[in-house]
Amino acid sequence: MEKKPVTRKNIAELCGVSISVVSRALNNSGYVEESKRRKIIETAEKLNYIPQPVAMSLQERRTKQLLYYCKDLSNEYYVDMYRGMCEAANKRGYLVTISGMMEFDRIKDTMVDGIIMPNEDLTSYYMKHGGKNYYLPVVSASYCNAVDIPKSVPLVEADMYQAMDFALSYLNSMGHKVIAYGFPYDRNNRNSRFLAWKNYIKEITGNTGWKKYLLAMNQNEMKDDPRILPFSEDLPEQSIHIEEDFFGKGKLAAQVFMERKLNATAIICFNDEFAIGMIKGFQEMGVNVPEQISVMGIDGTGTRKYLSPSLTTVNMFPKKQGRECANVLIDIIEKKNKRYIVHLKPKLQIGESVKNLHT
């Protein structure tokens, strides 16, 4: 017969004390009379007591580890967020582990004190598929997208709708009026960046004319390219762990733009990586950026400065978003003031990829 593991209850019964006294003695936390402490430790050693870290994590939140659940480590924005999380967590005595391949039903048994999700879509999927019943607290990065999350989750929000407004206003100030949008998803995706651009372009092109200026990378337009995935509101199981090829989609979008022979003088892209892909795509076709077409991104990741011409973008401060995610989660773990929404303001970051049409 398999021998049962020794528990703190067993030690408490042998030492004639409560389980809480045993816990304080073994964790070296709180007052325990010295004679009782020595007896408890000696008994634990004699019985070869091995603590169960998972149980300790769930009951006492003592692992000092956070889980960053990120399926897309090719996305520089999410990597910058991780750097920010590590900085904040380290200052408060925590570590941040990272995983995007772990099945959701295994998270409840993981030796962590809480979870950080990189976006609202993944948060919604996680909460609908068991997360709302787990003990571990969750904090999510947010981008002002309309997503149904079945349980209240604190959000650290980068206002992407405002970021698109900043980009459009800047391009207008540089003389650009007809502005296309490079989008890596299907037009049915309710992304806040897309909605802000759509509201703008419809005033110029009308209720249906705007569609030709939307460079959406979806299966309807790119049926034979394996990098193009269908959009699903339910985030199907098979797409959970697939990394996005924003750079490749950007290069494809540049080809689509030239094939349509659009009269737009500028293009705003979904993110910096998509924009960099577009610029590279244009350059390979002999199209000069910004002399022949201006390109903007939205993100503010460090990769933009290595591009020639340097990318004009709207900085969403991903490292700051990561720091705030970690701090909000640690505050919850340590039972400090709980913040449900933290707003981050974007800032225009001017490079060389936009032409001034007034000169």
Image (cartoon, grey):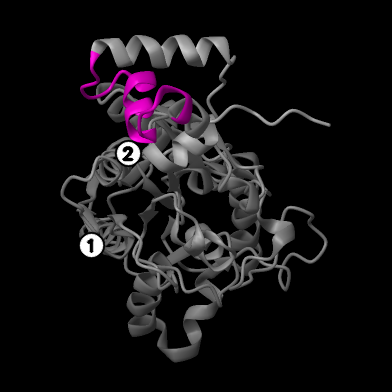
Ranked by sequence position, the earlier of labels 1 and 2 is 1
Secondary structure category for the residue under label 2 = helix
**Circle 1 sits in a helix, a strand or a loop, which is it?**
helix
Whether residue 310 is visible, yes or no, is: no
- Amino acid at circle 2: Ala
Taking depth in this image into account, of 81 and 347 the one nearest to the observer is 81
Asked if labels 2 and 1 touch by Cβ distance under 8 angstroms, the answer is no
Q: Locate residue 5, reporting x and y percent.
A: 64, 28
- Up the image or down, 306 lies above or below 269; here it is above
Residue 218 visible (yes or no): yes
The amino acid pointed to by label 1 is: Ser
Q: Residue furthest left?
A: 337
Residue beneath disc 1: 169
Q: Relative to 261, does residue 10 appear above or below in the rendering?
A: above
Q: Quadrant of the N terminus?
A: top right
Residue occupied by mark 2 = 326
- In the image, the segment drawn in magenta is 13-33
Residue 317 position (above or below residue 105): above
Q: Which is more toward the observer, 21 or 327?
A: 21
Instruction: Give the left or right position of residue 50, taking residue 265 as reference.
Output: right
- Assess disc 2: are there few (<14), some (14-19) or many (≥20) residues with their C-alpha within 10 Å of its C-alpha: many
- Quadrant of the image occupied by residue 230: bottom right
Q: Position of residue 66 (x, y in %)?
A: 43, 35
Of residue 202 and residue 32, the one placed in the foreground of this image is 32
Instruction: Examine the image and state in which quarter residue 272 appears.
Output: top left
Check the image and report above or below for 335 versus 61: below
For the point 39% across and 68% down, the residue is: 145
Residue at point 68%, 65% (across, down): 236
Q: CA distance from mark 1 to mark 2?
A: 33 Å
Q: Furthest-bottom residue in view?
A: 207
